[in-house]
């Protein structure tokens, strides 16, 4: 099992690793710890000015150029800092200790300057990924971890279960929804690239201030945790409205329960280095009993875009976070 993830997108990573370990107790699990050159900030007088990529563009230097390396090596006034990875490393260490995973990655130093000067050949010139050499290095590390793990791998590996069951519905990449919902809702389609289309359920661009509803079913005979995913944007302002979410259901005592939540439509500052982005966020709506519940919403402010919902997940109680049920949240073009 190889786990790779967006460096700041930790939602659900530990819970996913736990589920995979429960299903495949003897599997060799490798988690990739990879940094990129756009994970380095440029600072002056203690204040973050931008990323290393911003600095290179300002100086009109290409990554890998002698001019940039000379600037990094000889300019003692230039301060470079890694973006904070403390939260990420805590999660990875937890996966390693509790689930027996192996952590593999690209060499790096605590000093970003040293990392650039010593290991720059492993990173791509667009600051956003790895070079061919970097990918080859990761491949070799994965192969070595697998070879070591096979020394104690059982002849008949165990197969566990996926736990008590969950129900996850996402129309983000398919545009297909089976849940009952208001006839006022439409499935919006966005072209992200020539080969990729994405979808979200909303009241449409003609009615952005309107509210609506959708049913969600807990098909199990026990309580389950409910999460929804919705679109956000940023990093400096959001094109989406702050929205009030209402969850309604009847509990096992026959009492009608209503809970209210407010969305935060601003995307995380983790995406600041990408410029303007559309992303997907996930919100915990708490526990729901067996049967059908209603999720409704009303925008609290007027924006040109409607509230856009992309997925609903009914999972076991105690899950603290889940993923976005979609591809990498790197939607840089604000054309929706």
Image: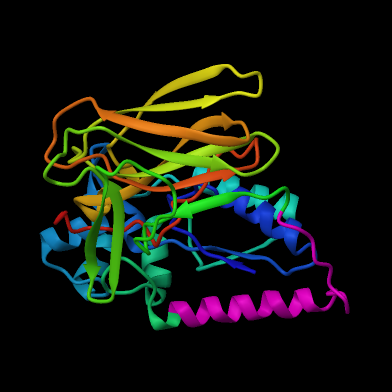
Quarter-wise, where is residue 139 in the image? bottom right
Q: Is residue 79 in view?
A: no
Q: Does the magenta segment cover residue 141? A: yes
- What residue do we see at 32% from left, 32% from top? 264
Eyeballing the image, is 14 above or below 294?
Answer: below
Residue at 53 percent of width and 36 percent of height: 292
Report the magenta residues as a range: 134-162
Residue at the image position 54 percent from the left and 48 percent from the top? 12
| Residue 268 or residue 24, whichever sits in front | 24
Residue visible at 39% across and 62% down? 327
Which x, y percent locates residue 305? 16, 42
Q: Give the x, y percent position of residue 204.
A: 18, 46
Question: Can you see residue 17?
Answer: yes
- Whether residue 2 appears in magenta in the rendering, the answer is no
> 9 or 225: which is nearer to us?
225
Q: Nearer the viewer, residue 268 or 74?
A: 268
Residue 289 placement, left or right of 111: right
Q: In the rendered view, how is the structure colored?
A: rainbow
Q: Is residue 151 left or right of residue 168?
A: right
Q: Quadrant of the N terminus?
A: bottom right
**Residue 22 location (% of width, % of height):** 75, 56
Q: How far across and how far down the image is residue 37, in percent?
A: 34, 62
- The quadrant in which residue 184 appears is top left
Position of the C terminus, as image quadrant, is bottom left
């Amino acid at each position: 099992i190889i786990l790779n993830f967006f460096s700041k997108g930790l939602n659900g990573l530990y819970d996913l690793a736990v589920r995979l370990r429960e299903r495949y107790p003897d599997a060799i699990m490798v988690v990739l710890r990879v940094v990129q050159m756009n994970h380095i900030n440029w600072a002056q007088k203690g204040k973050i000015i931008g990323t290393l990529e911003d600095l290179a563009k300002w100086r009109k230097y290409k990554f890998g150029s002698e001019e940039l390396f000379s600037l990094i090596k000889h300019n003692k006034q230039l301060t470079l800092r890694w973006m904070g990875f403390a939260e990420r490393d805590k999660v990875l260490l937890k996966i390693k200790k509790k689930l027996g995973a192996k952590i593999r990655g690209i060499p790096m130093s605590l000093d970003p300057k040293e990392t650039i000067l010593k290991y720059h050949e492993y990173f791509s010139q667009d600051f956003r990924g790895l070079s061919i050499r970097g990918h080859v290095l990761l491949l070799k590390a994965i192969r070595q971890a697998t070879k070591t793990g096979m020394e104690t791998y059982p002849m008949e590996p165990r197969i566990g279960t996926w736990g008590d069951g969950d129900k996850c519905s996402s129309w983000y990449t398919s545009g297909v929804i089976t849940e009952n919902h208001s006839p006022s809702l439409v499935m919006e389609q966005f072209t992200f690239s020539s080969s990729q289309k994405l979808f979200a359920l909303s009241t449409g661009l003609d009615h952005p201030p309107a509210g609506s509803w959708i049913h969600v079913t807990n098909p199990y005979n026990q309580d389950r945790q409910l999460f929804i995913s919705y679109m956000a944007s940023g990093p400096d302002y959001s094109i989406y409205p702050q929205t009030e979410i209402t969850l309604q259901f009847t509990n096992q005592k026959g009492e009608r329960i209503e809970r209210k939540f407010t969305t935060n439509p601003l995307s995380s500052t983790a995406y600041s280095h990408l410029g303007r982005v559309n992303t997907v966020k996930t919100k915990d709506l708490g526990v729901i009993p067996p049967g059908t519940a209603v999720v409704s919403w009303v925008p609290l402010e007027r924006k040109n875009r409607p509230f856009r919902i992309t997925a609903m997940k009914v999972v076991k109680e105690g899950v603290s976070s889940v993923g976005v049920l979609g591809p990498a949240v790197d939607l840089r073009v604000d054309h929706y």
